[in-house]
Image (spheres, rainbow, N blue to C red):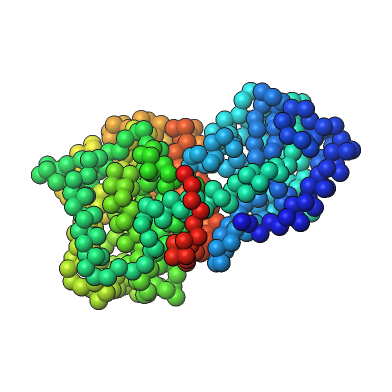
Amino acid sequence: MSDLSHAERQGFLRHFRGLIRKTEPCADLDLRGSLRLGTSTLRLPPPTLPLQILLGGEQGCRLHLYPELVLDADGRMRHRGSYLLIDPMTYFSDIGGFMRLGQGETLTLGRADATQRLLLRYPRAVERRHLRLRLSDDGLAIKNKSAGGVCVAPLTATDLTERMSRWRRRQLARLARVLGGPIEPLARAPALELIEQVIARMDREPYRALDRLGRPGGLLILPDRARPVFVGDLRARIDNLLGALTQNGLIHALEENSATLIILGSAVHPDRPEQAADMNGSVLMMDLLFRLKLRFPERVFYLRGRHDSFSEEISHAGLPQGALWEEALHQARGPDYRDAMRRFYERLPLVAVTSRYLATAAAPPIEAEQRQTLVDIDLHPELADRLAWARHPSGGTSSRDFGRRELTRMFRRLGLAETAACVMGAHPGYPAVSRTPDADARQFRIFSADPDWVDTLAGAHKQLLSLRYPAEPLLAVYNRLVRTGHLEAGP
């Protein structure tokens, strides 16, 4: 259940019904208590019920506006003050995209917006600028901007008002079934067995191109049919990984073999200066990733990033995190486990491709002459370092985007479509950047370890869509729900 009380919902419903008596009802909606917007702005208190919005009459587009709910430390769903606009026909059965409306923000709905056209698949009945939503401390203002009409109605049935919270809990229940229990530190023997099983799987990955010696090379060639979901640097933030897994339909898609999860390296080493020397979260993060890899060996992939090493060059806040990581594994799990982690790092791919995208941790392989260059990456150590570490082919550390010509030539040499996208990791403070396909550079950079937000990228209709979720205290909540058995059942 959420914290939107019955009394608050009834109060909002009474206000809405009072407006209906003063305006024209909407016959286009098959719900009682709906109204048609005229030329005046409809002003509502902050909605405590989801709203159905119909753009353009019976042949138009039905959308739902839901209060955005987040889990608090007690495991309760609470309204964070913002709203999600979704397509109810697809959101709850897929890796659902959405439009967020936050406090002080304005959202204009219509076919003029390329992201909305991609996400909501507007029919022709929806005009270029059809409806404007504005959220403020005073409430929600809705302004009809079209000639095609707009109808609005609150959703009052319990299966609809509670749909978002119940759906979210089902995602947590799915994850619990996948993992088979809580997320907690493993003893030495099962931890060593787990990482050795992962290494054995990686030695025979079906999508891994083999190098000249018949070994797994540096390139993953993934199938086009699976929908990609990218996660950037996690830096030991387990809560953020759990958010990426459960704030959408990703777990279900992995179970159905309809999605691939590609993590762009650097899952370890906290980026908070006060925690830079604490490696306990990194140990737990790798255990979780290994469990996911074993459960979905052909759907979960991890690319080598800057922090996937014991190198003494890896430092943060004045501390040698690479060396500290090696010592922490040695102390916690012994030399055999430490050596196994080194072998795991040595086996990691550096680049993943399909015909439509290329992904790497730090910089695109602009200078690679052909795919075999990436497969035989051990023959090109400087290129390998740039792919995992540097963000510029010169070997520097500056972040820059690459032009259309550079990317087009690279895609052509590597056998990708010239309109393909390039996905890379990013450093703290560099937000995920998306560009439309006709921009000068078709690039996405993504950082997923922000303390307040979880940034991901997901494939949508042969393009990539940025999906951002609020960070939540999910590790503690998930473990408590698993141990108490309070996870909601259901498909």
Work out which residue is located at the far left of the displayed protein and give it.
213
Front residue of this view, candidates 402 and 146:
146
| Quadrant showing the N terminus | bottom right
Front residue of this view, candidates 434 and 184:
184
Q: Position of residue 100 (x, y in %)?
A: 62, 47
Q: Residue at x 77, y 35 (%)?
A: 32
Q: Position of residue 225 (x, y in %)?
A: 36, 33
Q: Which residue is drawn at 31% across and 56% down?
A: 291
Work out which residue is located at the far right of the displayed protein and give it.
22
Q: Where is residue 77 in the image (x, y as percent from the top left)?
A: 60, 58
Report if residue 235 is visible in the image. Answer: no
Say if 477 sits above or below 418 in the image: below
Question: How many numbered marks have been drawn onto this rendered protein structure?
Answer: 0
Q: Residue at x 82, y 32 (%)?
A: 25
Report if residue 287 is visible in the image. Answer: yes
In the picture provided, is 306 more to the left or to the right than 130? left
Name the image quarter holding residue 39.
top right
Q: Where is residue 85 in the image (x, y as percent from the top left)?
A: 63, 42
Front residue of this view, candidates 190 and 201:
190
